[in-house]
Image (spheres, rainbow, N blue to C red):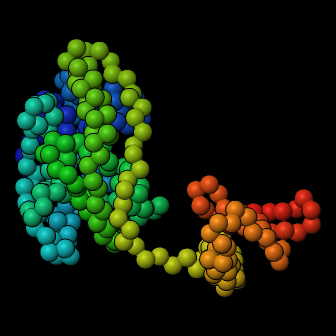
Amino acid sequence: MHGFPIDRRGFIGGSDARIVMGDREDSLIRLWREKRGEREPEDLSRNLLVQLGRATEQVNVAWYQMNTGQVVVDAQRRIFHPVHRWMAATLDGRIQETGEVFEAKFMLPWNFSQETAAEKHMAQLQHNMWVVAARSAVLSVITGGGQWIEIKIHADPLYQHLLLTAEKKFWRCVQSGELPALFNIETPRPRLEAIKVVDMSTSNQWAELAGTYLRTRDAHGEHETAKADLKKLMPEDAKEATGHGIKAKRSKSGAISFEAQGTEGSDAPVQ
């Protein structure tokens, strides 16, 4: 799937977007020199992670299609933005039925999380969605631990605006010869669909809070029921009602609040 020669000097692609929006100045300067033709692109033939990603790409697509019933098309199709011709996306594919951008990735299992994966590839995904005018993207991840994870990422108009601004400035630097500077744009927190079922049995904090919840659940229910019934008993024309250790007050908006009447000066509001 990567058999054709790739000359990436004439445009900013999705993988470039990650560098442009990143926080490593050395990588940004290296990319700038590559785009200007002042140095050869980095040789990734001996980068094992990159090669694993390429080697598992077809497996990734096949596994995604088998598990979702969706069809991935346009594999390795290069698309240029209709207006900004210096922007392009070389797609791993698109989902035939929805038009979503499809991105296949291989990641190591250590400290893996959906949030980390989405954040790591956010710039690339938002760039590609912008180029092809897609509203969402599918990140299909195979980990070295034998897991397959599907993550859906939605287009973020604000982040895409910042990304476009940064890429425009970078491309002007490529054309003018001016050294680019880091743009220091924070990656947005990805909005992920809640699809996982997790076991919190090993969390001590969860255990402590769960015990408190179970211990106070019945008392809380009785408290809420009593409060609702007391509100019903309070006459509609009453501003304040007292008796048996509590005071009820009606606000100007009609809301009723309660206070416990203990010793003088120790009244506390009851919610």
Q: Residue at x 19, y 39 (%)?
A: 13
* Total numbered labels placed on residues in the image: 0
Looking at the picture, does residue 165 appear above or below residue 220? above
Q: Is residue 222 left or right of residue 244?
A: left
Spot occupied by residue 219 in the image (x, y as percentages of width and height): 70, 82
Q: Residue at x 11, y 37 (%)?
A: 81
Spot occupied by residue 16 in the image (x, y as percentages of width and height): 25, 37
Q: Is residue 122 left or right of residue 261?
A: left
Instruction: State the residue in front, 248 or 31.
Output: 248
Outermost residue, front direction? Answer: 237
Instruction: State the residue in front, 221 or 101.
Output: 221
Spot occupied by residue 238 in the image (x, y as percentages of width and height): 68, 66
Instruction: State the residue in front, 48 or 247.
Output: 247
Can the viewer see residue 115?
Answer: yes
Find residue 233 and report its image quarter: bottom right
Looking at the picture, does residue 81 appear above or below residue 149? above
